[in-house]
Image (tube, rainbow, N blue to C red):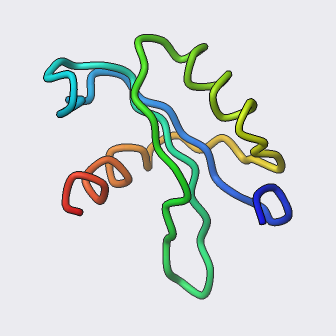
Amino acid sequence: MKGTQYSHFGIGANFLDIHAMRYRMFGAVWKVEKGFRYIMGYWFADSEKIITEIVHSEGWTNLQKVSGQISDIYQAVRAE
């Protein structure tokens, strides 16, 4: 269930949104359990504020903002 466990949250700029075919902000929520990373959700938007609002409106709580890993998360999403 969302928000019942500790989750990571990251945002980065200039990621290609393949649906819009332009570079935008990219944000994601993920968790790490037993050494495996599970991406719980991701979003593209035109600003960090919009992504943050989406994350909060979807009920995500107990988030730890993490920098430096969002590029890896983006690459994992693109590989799907």
> Which residue is rendered at x = 31% and y = 19% of the image?
24
Please provide percent x and percent y for residue 79.
19, 61
Q: Which residue is located at x 75 percent, y 45 percent? A: 60
2 or 34: which is nearer to us? Answer: 2
Find residue 18 and report its horizontal and vertical position in percent: 17, 33
Q: Quadrant of residue 23?
A: top left
Residue 38 place in picture, x, y as percent: 51, 69
How many numbered badges does the structure rendering display? 0
**3 relative position to 13: left or right:** right
Residue furthest toward the left? 21
Classify residue 25 as left or right of residue 64: left
| In the image: residue 13, left or right of residue 3 | left
Query: Does 16 appear above or below 58?
Result: above
From the viewer's perspective, tell me whether residue 1 is left or right of residue 35: right
Residue 54: x %, y % from top left: 63, 28
Q: Quadrant of residue 17?
A: top left
Tell me the residue at 43%/20% (across/down).
45
Image quarter hosting the C terminus: bottom left
Q: Which quadrant is the N terminus positioned in?
A: bottom right
